[in-house]
Amino acid sequence: MGRDDHASADFRDGSFMTFGGYVNGSRVDEVIKFKHEGPNVVAEHISGGELATPGPAARASFSVGVA
């Protein structure tokens, strides 16, 4: 599902995570990790959404950094 006003961060292993934003006009609290497996990109839901593991509160229009 497309989203906007979310934040993403790249990691040294080539994976990246995205959090928050809007989907169909509603803020979401999903944390999703993406990684390459051969020619495919695989998404793993870490927290939020319909998962039992709660994520941070839903938000949009923010930034994120990785040290």
Image (spheres, helix red, strand yellow):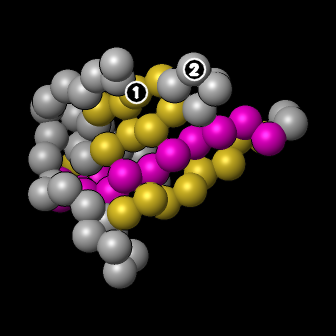
Looking at the rendered structure, the secondary structure element under dot 1 is strand
Q: Main secondary structure of the magenta part?
A: strand
> Percent position (x, y) of residue 35?
65, 39
**Closer to viewer: mark 2 or mark 1:** 2
> Where does the magenta region start and end?
23-37
Are there few (<14), some (14-19), or many (20+) residues within 10 Å of tag 1?
Answer: some
Q: Which residue is mark 1?
A: 9
Cα distance, mark 2 to mark 1? Answer: 10 Å
Specify whether residue 27 is painted magenta. Answer: yes
Q: Quadrant of residue 37?
A: top right
> Percent position (x, y) of residue 25?
19, 53
Are there few (<14), some (14-19), or many (20+) residues within 10 Å of tag 2?
Answer: few
Give the amino acid at mark 1. Answer: Ala
> Percent position (x, y) of residue 46?
44, 59
Q: Which residue is mark 2?
A: 12
Specify whether residue 43 is painted magenta. Answer: no
**Relative side of 51 to 62, left or right:** right
Callout 2 touching callout 1 (CB < 8 Å): no
Examine the rendering and report whether any part of residue 64 can be seen. yes
Seen from this angle, which residue lies furthest right? 38
> Percent position (x, y) of residue 19?
32, 44
| Camera-side residue of 56 and 49 | 56
**Relative side of 65 to 43, left or right:** left
Examine the rendering and report whether any part of residue 24 can be seen. no
**Relative side of 55 to 59, left or right:** right
Which disc is residue 45 wearing?
Answer: none
